[in-house]
Amino acid sequence: MNRTFADRVGRVEPSATLAISNAAAELEADGVDVVDLSVGEPDFPTPENVVAAGKQALDDDHTGYTPSSGIPELKRAVAEKFADDGLSYDTDQIIVTPGGKQGLFETFMTLLDDDDEVVLLDPAWVSYEAMAKLAGADISRVDLTPHEFQLEPALEQLAATVTDDTTMLVVNSPSNPSGAVFSDAALEGVRDIAVDHDVTVVSDEIYQRIAYDEEPTSLGSLDGMANRTVTLNGFSKAYSMTGWRLGYVGMPGSMAEQAGKIHGHSVSCAVNFVQHAGVEALKNTDEPVVEMREAFRERRDMLLDLFADHGKEVPHPDGAFYMMLPVDEDDTAWCEGAIEEAHVATVPGSAFGTPGYARLSYAASEERLREGVARLAEHGYL
Ligand code: PMP
Ligand code: GLU
C-alpha cells in the first residue's frame, strides 16, 4: 500500500523522552539491567488515599461519560486550588483533561494558526515544539544555557525576540529539563513583555509542587496577566499519578468554550473514576506530596555531590526532578554510548534544543542513582 500521510505528521519526530524510555524497557526485557534515568516519572506509588478514592468511585459505578470539561466537584476543587495560587479562573474557564499533555495540545490547537509565532525558552520540554509544529506555527527560541538556565539574565534577549507578531510564549517553571525555578523578577519581566506585545502566555506549572526553596509564583497571578495566561497543571508529577492520565487547564476569557470543542470532539472527557480520585488528591494529599518532594531534594543533593566528586559541575536545579549534566558536544552519541555500554538511560539535551547536555531524571532510588553514576564513571562517561 502506497499511502501518503498528512504534512503535519511529517513535521514532527516521536517524543524523544518516551522513545528512550521505550528503548530502555526493551533492553530490560532482554534481561539487561538498565539504570533508567530517562523518563520523567516519579518512582513512588500513588498515595493510598487517592488509590482508595479511585477504587471507591469504581464501586460506586462512576464508570460512564462525565460532562466533557470535568465533573463539577473536581472543577470546583481545581478552581479553589487555582485561587490559592492567586489565579481567578471560574469553573467554566477550566477543562479537566486526560493528562496535562492533552490540555497543552488543546491550548496550542485553539490559539495557533498556520505561520503564527510561538516563543520557547530553551531548553524546552520536547512536546512544546511538536505541538507548535502540529498546529502549523513557527518557533523562535531564546537560549537560557549561557545563564545556567535562568530566565532573569535573558530578559533582554526575550524582549528582542517577542514582537507584535508573536502569538504565544511558553514558560515552564520549575523547568523540565533544567530544574530551574524562575525568579519573581523574571516572571515580572515576562509580564511586561507579554503586555507590551499583547501575547498569550502558557504557564506550564506541572512541577509546581516540586520546588525546593520558595513556592513558585503563578504567572497568571501577576497584575496584567489574568486575561492573557493559560495555566496548565496536573496530577502526574505532584501526586505520582502518571498512568492515571489526569490534568487540568485554566483558560482566560472565553477560550475554554473554543478549546472545549477540540476536547469534546477528541477525548469526550477524562476518565470518570479517575476524576473522583483527583478530587481526593487535591483536597487531602499534602503530606505525601511534601514527603516525595523532600526525597527528591535529598537525591538531588546526593547526585550533585557525586558528580562534583568526579569533577562535574552541574547547573544547580531548584525544582522538578531533572538536572542537565554537561556532556560531549555530540550529546546524542554520548547518550547512545551511555545506554549501550554503561546501561544508563538519559535523554540528549539536543531533544530540548540544548546540545552538549544529557538530561537526567532523578526520580529513582538513591541506590540506583549511585549505581548509575558509578557505571558512567567506570565506562569513561564522566
Ligand atoms: N509539561 C511538562 C513540562 C512535562 O514534563 C509533562 C510530562 N509528561 C507534562 C506537561 C504532561 O504531563 P502529563 O500529561 O502526564 O500530565
Ligand atoms: N514529561 C516526562 C518527560 O519529560 C514524561 C514523558 C513525556 O511526556 O514526554 O520525561
Image: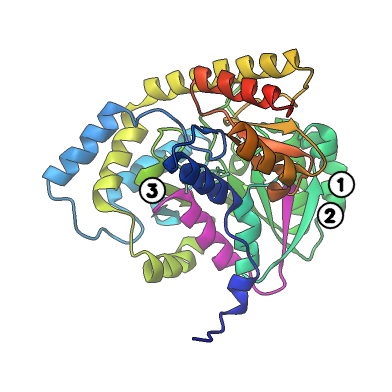
Q: Which residue is mark 3?
A: 245
Q: Residues within 10 Å of mark 2 (few under 14, many from 20)?
A: some
Q: Amino acid at mark 3?
A: Arg
Tell me the magenta residue range: 97-121
Instruction: Indicate yes or no whether the magenta region holds residue 135.
Output: no
- Quarter containing the C terminus: top right
Q: Measure the C-alpha gap from mark 3 to mark 2.
A: 35 Å
Q: Which residue is mark 1?
A: 157
Instruction: Indicate yes or no whether the magenta region holds residue 116.
Output: yes
Of residues 266 and 307, the one drawn nearer to the viewer in this rendering? 307
Q: Is residue 209 left or right of residue 116?
A: left
Which image quadrant is residue 133 in?
A: bottom right
Q: Measure the C-alpha gap from mark 3 to mark 1.
A: 36 Å
Q: Amino acid at mark 1?
A: Gln
Residue 213 is at least partly visible in this image: no
Q: Position of residue 326 (x, y in %)?
A: 77, 32
Count of marks overlaid on the render = 3
- Mark found first going from the N terminus, 3 or 1: 1
Q: Position of residue 66 (x, y in %)?
A: 26, 58
- Mark found first going from the N terminus, 3 or 2: 2
**Helix, strand or loop at mark 3:** loop
Q: Is mark 1 within 8 Å of ligand 1?
A: no
| Residues at discs 1 and 2 in contact (Cβ within 8 Å) | yes
Q: Is mark 3 within 8 Å of ligand 1?
A: yes
Of residues 316 and 53, the one drawn nearer to the viewer in this rendering? 316
Q: Position of residue 233 (x, y in %)?
A: 49, 43
Give me the residue at 27% from left, 27% from top: 48
The relative height of residue 204 versus residue 254 in the rendered view (above or below) is above
Q: Which residue is mark 2?
A: 161
Q: Amino acid at mark 2?
A: Thr
